[in-house]
Structures are given as C-alpha cells and as structure tokens.
Image: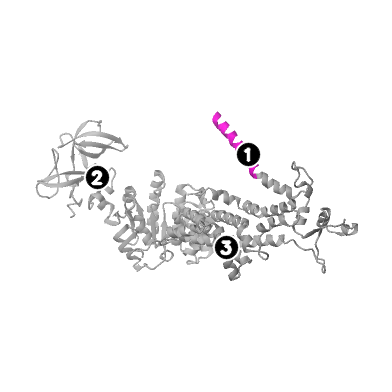
Amino acid sequence: MARIELKGISKSFGAQRALRDLDLVVEDGEFFVLLGRTGAGKTTTLRVIAGLEKPDTGSVAIGNRDVGGWTAAERDVALVLQQYSLYPRLTVRGNLEFPLRSRVRNFSEEEIAARVQKAAQTLQITHLLDRKVERLSGGEMQRVSIGRAIVRQPSVFLMDEPLSALDAKLRESLRVELKKLHSDLGATFLFVTHDQVEAMSMGDKIGVLQQGRLVQVGTPADIYERPLNTFVARSVGSPPMNLIDGQLSGGMAEIGACRLPVRAAAGAGQAVTFGVRPENVVLESGAPGEARIFDIEDQGVIKVLSMDMGETRLHVTVPAGTHVARDEVVRFGWKPERVLTFDPQTGVNLALA
Amino acid sequence: MAEVKTKGEVIFNRAAVIAVIVALVVMLTPIFWIAATAFKPRNLATTVPPTVFFEPTLSPFAKLFTKRSQLREPVEQEVYDNAAWWEKLIYDGGEQVVRNRKSGEVTSSGFGNRYMNSLIVSVISTLLAVSMGTITAYGFSRFRVPGEQDWLFFILSTRMLPPVVVAIPMFLMYRAVGLHDTHIGLIILYTAFNLSFAVWIMKGFIDEIPREYEEAALVDGYTRLQAFWKIVLPEALTGIAATAVFCFITAWNEYAFALMMTSKNAQTAPPYIPSQVGSGLSDWTVIASGAFLFLLPVAVFTFLLRNHLLRGMSFGAIRK
C-alpha cells in the first residue's frame, strides 16, 4: 500500500510562500501528474513527500502512516530529478548499486548483482553498465536515473520533470516507456511537469497547481473538458482554449456583432467569458461568425489558424486539406455543446459553480 | 584538418609565446640562481661577473648541517684521509667540524631540526585548517544558518588585521600560557590564520557541487554524514587540494610569527636561514643550499597535486 496523503501542507522560504494549505491524495498505484508553471510549488511538494523539506504545517502520510518525523532514507521513496542526479565519479553499475549498498538495506552481493541486472534489462542499458556516467547521452543518463530508482523496488516514485532536459523525440519515447514501467511495477507514481502534453498523455489523474494551491484534480478528460476556471482551461491544450468576452442572452452568445448559439442556462444580458477549444470551432459558409485569417500554421495533420474577430484573436484547428489563405474573411460557427462559460471577474466555470 | 589562422592571429600567437618566455625567464632566474649557488664552491659564489659554469660540489650542504670553526693550521694528512667524504669537503673549505670533546660526536648546526619543525607545523596546521574549513564551509553552503552573511564576514574579517598588529599581545599571551616556543603554539597560530581562508575557498567549491547529488543519496537511504563522505568529499577533492596547497605555502613560508614566537625548540626554517648570514663571515653558498632545500617541499607538494590544481584554478570547472 502506498497511498500518499498530504493534509494542510504549508511551506514558506523566507517571505516566499511556496505551498499554501495544500491537500493532495494520490491513490495506491496511480500515475498522478502535478501540472504547474515554474514556481507553482511542484518541486516543493515532491521534496516534502520525499522528506528533503520539512513543511511548516500539515502532515504527510505514505501508505496510511504518518511519516512526518521520518528521514528521507526511511521513507523508501525513489526520486528522479531533471538532471544532476547521477554520481559523476561512478560507473553506471556503481550508480545502480549505490542505493542497494546503503546500510539501511543490507543486501547480499548476489542480490545486488541480480537487481542491477534486472533493472538494466528493464531499461535496456545492460551494454552501458561499465561505462562512466560522464560518457552517457542525456537520454541514457535519464534511463540510468530511472534505473537507480527502480533497483530498490520502492512503492512510491517521485519524478521531478525527468524528461524536460531531453530533446523532443527522446521525450516521446521515454514517455511511453515510463507508462509501461508504471503498469509493470504497479507502484504509485507522482510526476511533476510544466508540460501539459506530458500531463495529458501520461496521467491517470492530473492536479493543477497555481501559486502553491491545488486548483483542480481530475482525469485528463475532466481537466480538458470541464476546467474549474480559466486558469486550468488555459493550462492544458495547445493551442490554448479561446477565451472571448461577450454577453449571454436567451441561449445566444453575443460577441461584438455576432450571435452564436450556446447551451448554457443563464439569464439575459449577463456578461460572461466564453471558452471554446480550437477544435470546436468550425469553418462553414453561412455560419454566424465572421473573422479575418491572420496567420496559418501548417502542422501536417491539421492547420492552426489565427483569426481576428474584431479585437479578439481566435485559434482554430482545421483539417490540413482545408483551403484558406491569409487575410481571407471566413465564416465560422462552433459546437454549442462544447462552449464553456466563465465568470469574467473570478474566472470560475459557471457550469460548475 | 589544419586550422586556418589569420595573419593577426599568427602575430598574436607569436607575441604570446615571447611574452610567456620573458615571464618565465624573469620568474625562474632567481630560482635557478639559488639552485646554482647551492652547488657552488664558496669562492665562486659572489664573483663579478657571475660564474655560470662550474664544477658542482656538495660542500655547501655539508656545511649547512654542521657546526664548524676555522682551521688555524692545515689539517694533518692522516686525519684528512680517514675523514668521511662530507668532512673532507669541509676541510677543503679551510674549516673543521666542531666535535663534542668527550664523545667526539659531530655538532649539528640545527638546520635539520628546524626543517623538521617546519614540516611538522606546516603539515599539521594545513590538515587542521583544511578539514575544519571544509566542514564549516559545508555547513554554510547547505544549511540555512541564521546570520550567514554576518558570520562569513566575521570569519573573513580575522584576515583584515595585519598580523604585525597582534604580534606583541600574542607574544605576551603565548608566554603567559606556556605556548611560546612550542610546536602546538605555532600550529594553533597557523591554523587560525589559514582557517578563514580555507572556509571561504571551500565554500566556493562546495557551492558548485549540486545539492541534488546529496539529496539523491539521502533518498537512496544514506544519512547526511554518509552522503557527505561518499558524495561531497570526492567531488570537493579538487578544492581541497587547492586549499591545502595555499594553506601549506602560507604556513611553510611564514616568517614574522615564527621569528617571534619560537626561539630554539620549535623554531622553523624561515627565521633560521637568514640568521646564518650574521654568524661570522657570511657564506652565501650555505644560505643558498638552505634556501634550496626549503623550496623543495612546496615544489613537490604542488607537483603531486598539479592535476587537481589545474582543475581547481578554473573555478566552476565541475561538469554539469
């Protein structure tokens, strides 16, 4: 059992408040992704769980046991960092053996060799075992880091942006490997990232952090389709969700001179912010909206259009076969059932409020 | 593939080579001169123009380690033939070794003892300063110490006072507590003097070592102390070597306090060598041989640690 539970965690560094009254539950065996920008408190959360940082208030429980007084060594969690985490003076084998040679564990030599071999096979780094760490590529280093985490067979893995320093291709392949590793090991993963693609593609659940507070927790679909507020809405999805200020009256959205249908129950003449994802906007002749195309980005499968609708810039994705040109004036509509409404002042999703 | 150089670069390179040669000549000439004089017969030491080519002799070293007196009359042939090789060298110079009247033992000049004193005091004070400095620097580097900046400034401020200012009070205190002319007294003094320096230099080096290494070790199941031994210390080796060389040189070369705080028992080589200038006719070859031997330990020590030093001199050279 390795359920992680944080209750009322606050942590300040001098005047800087890194975490404010944070509650977080990661269920046993879950792949949980903490998504947030730089300085949102993601790393601090991990360090508090790992025991590298003492929270000012609040409690940490791993496997339903309060570990507040335990040292990092006693908590038996594994930590994979973005970089620096390999000991530069040791070989790959030395690095993999290092956690097993701790006096806490007291493994026999055969046990150590067997575990190193198994981890190396899992990550396909057997051919690197006797190489010096400094002679590895970034991807290999990160594999070894993960290897050093799995040799101990801990029940909790904490990963602090392990893929951020890698190039795009490697990131993709390691993403797949990490997911496979997770399902093979059945351990609890807490993965921290600022990359919404990683969060969406890897997480069983996503927690969105903003300035030390957990704004929303949910499945990727929840976060994507039912964001609690405009911050969460813009945290996931690329290009980001369009947020358009307008009026809601009688089942219609009034944006400038255009009137578009929506499926939101609301009173007449209410000011709201409409949120619509780029893929839910459709170009159609005779549709009620009108906009001028400002830029076209051809991504192969799709085209991303930037359109100006009066003062508002919209992002729209269309199939790559769509023929459009710059400065062309097009007509568009949207899928009314996919349009969200937010309070223009607080940013809260009106449907969930 | 050959590197293509512009004309300007070629000229610059040549100028740089010439500059290096000039600098080397300027810096190495005194050392060459000391080394040459240490092997010269006495009558060639102060010739004008200087003698460059000569037959080297060990007689300055024989004289350096013994107490001698002038021969009033030439030594008897039989005594000369039975004398040891180094004693013959002294007879050749018109001097004789002073022997104990009863036992006939050769009287030492005391240079050997002074030299040992220098080694003892320098090595021990360097070990102390570097080890204490490393631990202190680690503490400052890794933990939130209240008033950290003030403490560091305080540590540095001990170096701001010219040593000469505290010399007399120190002398009186040392005499009062019985540390005067003791090894331990000098060791304490040099350790204190080098410690602030060691803390500052080591802090720079330890700051450069990413905390992530230790934190990974902590999570891997090691205690803070084990992480320090297994991870930080090997990484800091370069810095430790550089600091040790600096501390050793400072302690080895220290003159003023050694002159004041020691007289016989614990006197080090620096105050001893010049004291030989004044006793009787100055024999420059003996002084040069003393200086030559004195230069050796620092040269050897630096040479042994040269790989670490090269990396250490370029601060921040730790691979990221």
What is the three-letter code of the residue carrying label 1? Val
Q: Are marks 3 and 1 in contact (CB under 8 Å)?
A: no
The residue range painted magenta reads B1-27
Give me the C-alpha separation between circle 3 and circle 1. 42 Å
The answer to which of marks 3 and 1 sits earlier in the sequence is: 1
Q: Chain of mark 3?
A: B
Q: List the residue tagged with mark 2.
A: A241
Residue at 90 percent across and 59 percent down: it is B78
Which label sits in the foreground, 3 or 1?
3
Provide the chain ID for the residue under circle 2: A
Q: Position of residue A63 (x, y in %)?
A: 35, 66
In the picture of the structure, the residue carrying the numbered disc 3 is B168
Q: Are marks 3 and 2 in contact (CB under 8 Å)?
A: no
| Closest to the observer, B243 or B253 | B253
What residue is drawn where x is 79% and y is 63%? B106
Left or right of residue B235, residue A66 in this image: left
The residue carrying pointer 3 sits among few (fewer than 14), some (14 to 19) or many (20 or more) residues within 10 Å by Cα, namely: some
On what subunit does the disc labeled 1 rest?
B
Is B19 included in the stretch rendered in magenta?
yes
| Disc 2/disc 1 C-alpha distance (Å) | 69 Å
- Reading the image, the residue beneath label 1 is B22
Image coords of residue B145 (percent x, y): 42, 61
Residue under disc 2 on the same chain as residue under disc 1: no
Disc 1 crowd rating (10 Å Cα; few below 14, some 14-19, many 20+) is few
Residue type, numbered disc 2: Met
Magenta segment main secondary structure = helix
Q: Residues within 10 Å of mark 2 (few under 14, many from 20)?
A: many
Tag 3 and tag 1 share a subunit: yes
Rendering quarter of residue B118:
bottom right
